[in-house]
Image (cartoon, rainbow, N blue to C red):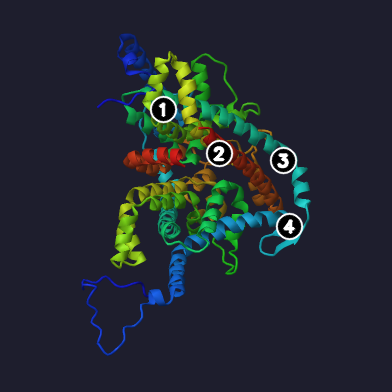
Amino acid sequence: MTTASRPSLLPPAAPRVPKGKPRPPVRRTAHPWRRRLADQAHAYAFLLGGLLCFALFSWYPAIRAVVIAFQEYTPGSGGEWAGTANFTRVLHDPEFAAAWRNTLAFTALALLVGFAVPFLLALVLNELRHAKAFFRVVVYLPVMIPPVVSALLWKWFYDPGAGLANEALRFAHLPTSTWSNGADTALISLVIVATWANMGGTVLVYLAALQGIPGELYEAAELDGAGLLQRIRHVTVPQTRFVILMLMLLQIIATMQVFTEPFVITGGGPENATVTVLYLIYKYAFLYNDFGGACALSVMLLLLLGAFSAVYLRLTRSGEDDA
Amino acid sequence: MTAPRTLVSPAALARPRGRAVYWTVFTGVVLLFALAFLFPVYWMATGAMKSPDEVTRTPPTLVPEQWHLGGYADAWELMRLPTHLWNTVVQAAGAWLLQLVLCTAAAYALSRLRPAFGKVVLGGILATLMVPAQALVVPKYLTVADLPLIHTSLLNDPLGIWLPAVANAFNLYLLKRFFDRMPRDVLEAAEIDGAGRVRVLWSIVLPLSRPVLGVVSIFALVAVWQDFLWPLMVFSDTDEQPISVALVQLSQNIPLTVLVAAMVIASIPMVALFLVFQRHIIAGVGAGGTKG
């Protein structure tokens, strides 16, 4: 395709066109639409590969999830319209209620622990003036360990026989726990694993946000007689509110899709105490071979998380307006 | 160099009482970090070197009585780690390369080339950020198992990891935002000089984008290396499985020391990557969060 001109060392003012011939018209002005078309072709040539991948692996599956949710689908031979049969079947599955209860409880616990602990840690780390790099590296180290390894490592810690978790309790003369092997303690045990493994990223983001707070605000607050806790409440928290909200939403979205920890550590047990929605989706697809049911569940999860996203957008936008 | 003012005033820290509190807190945090984050890693690395008998003993030994390196050798052989590590490397490298080429090109087009319906396309891409990726694994699996129109299956094929990895809205947006902020005059000067679009991208935009390309590269590599659910679905063939899937599949019937050794080996590449690029990774994570 012909763009304006090639790089040239010749001075532009001396076109060596024979006198008899008229100069060919400059394309650019003669056919603006043509140039625009060429520009578009170029732009889409750059865009094509990425666009195809998004279309195939993001947009198309999203549409397909909705379609298959209303079909009786067998891989290879296509689907038949099934109305809302998939939804009723899934809703009547006793595991359905358990999966949602567990997922919501997991999310709530992870939010509680996963918000408070990293925020406090970041607050303290931001005050330390020595070994800063060391702390940042160490807190982020578990994030770089593959999640499967973290899960297997904690499964070993939780082992009722030679597990380190109970050894630590015995060492401190505390009663031992069933950890991931008891129906009552399994879920919170998994929350501990997830928090341990993912906290580093949250701490680093909070640290970056804390460093963005202008020092004058603290000075002014101190001159007004604000104590340490008051400064946290009236300066630190409002100044980082946007980041806090954003991370909370990201965390909700991430923890509602928890899979690796229950799959590796508990296998959904004991007594379905740790079956999560995503785990159930996996089971429907790969154990029961029920793709219609799996997609019906996916659609429900999508709708709920979409609602979370919408609420979050509303909240942050109004928060921005106040500021 | 004076540190920026934070929650606690420098004056308070300078007082003897303040200093005492500071060093107490400092020591406490060091101990806490060592116990919470370093000790589990230490436990894993040394657990693999204990004898099978010692590793299950109660109360456990803090330091192995005898250092057996056999656990690592057994893991290497029994769990066929070379195969699985190589699979992981192939999957991660291909995903990284494709993402770098296709996402950069698409981000450049959206940022600089003003394609028709560019806003719609960008909106569609950003919308996928709001849709939880994992919730769509089943329809995505069905798509990969039988691609529309050409009816090919990418199951048990690295392409099944590579192509879906390109649909990464976060990385694409990161790149686009970086291109958006590039000084306009530099690019326009190049265009007036007659450089084509590929040339502008290759010899001006990309060299200027080294920091963001680094961040995207690390995110892309780490994402594939750490992923579990998607490769679990794509690779039913044991010979093709990456290390994460193989570890879980084999964890049931293998001696504990061997499994732990394999876990250590599986962690080494990412931890090494992190230790080498820690500065960039830590800066990238912090920046990605606050500016998003």
Name the amino acid type tagged 1. Phe
Whichever of labels 4 and 2 marks the residue nearer the N terminus, that label is: 4
Name the amino acid type tagged 2. Arg
Callout 3: helix, strand or loop?
helix
Residue under label 1:
B39
Name which quarter of the figure residue B51 lies in: top left
Q: Is residue A211 above or below residue B17?
A: below
Q: Nearer the viewer, residue B239 or A137?
A: A137
Both marks 4 and 3 on one chain: yes
Name the amino acid type tagged 4. Gln
What chain does mark 1 sit on? B
Q: Is residue B79 above or below residue B116?
A: above
Residue shown at 51% from the left, 24% from the top? A165
What chain does mark 2 sit on? A
Task: Using the numbered discs, state the Cα–Cα distance from disc 2 to disc 3 in whole angstroms.
Answer: 34 Å
Residue under label 4:
A71
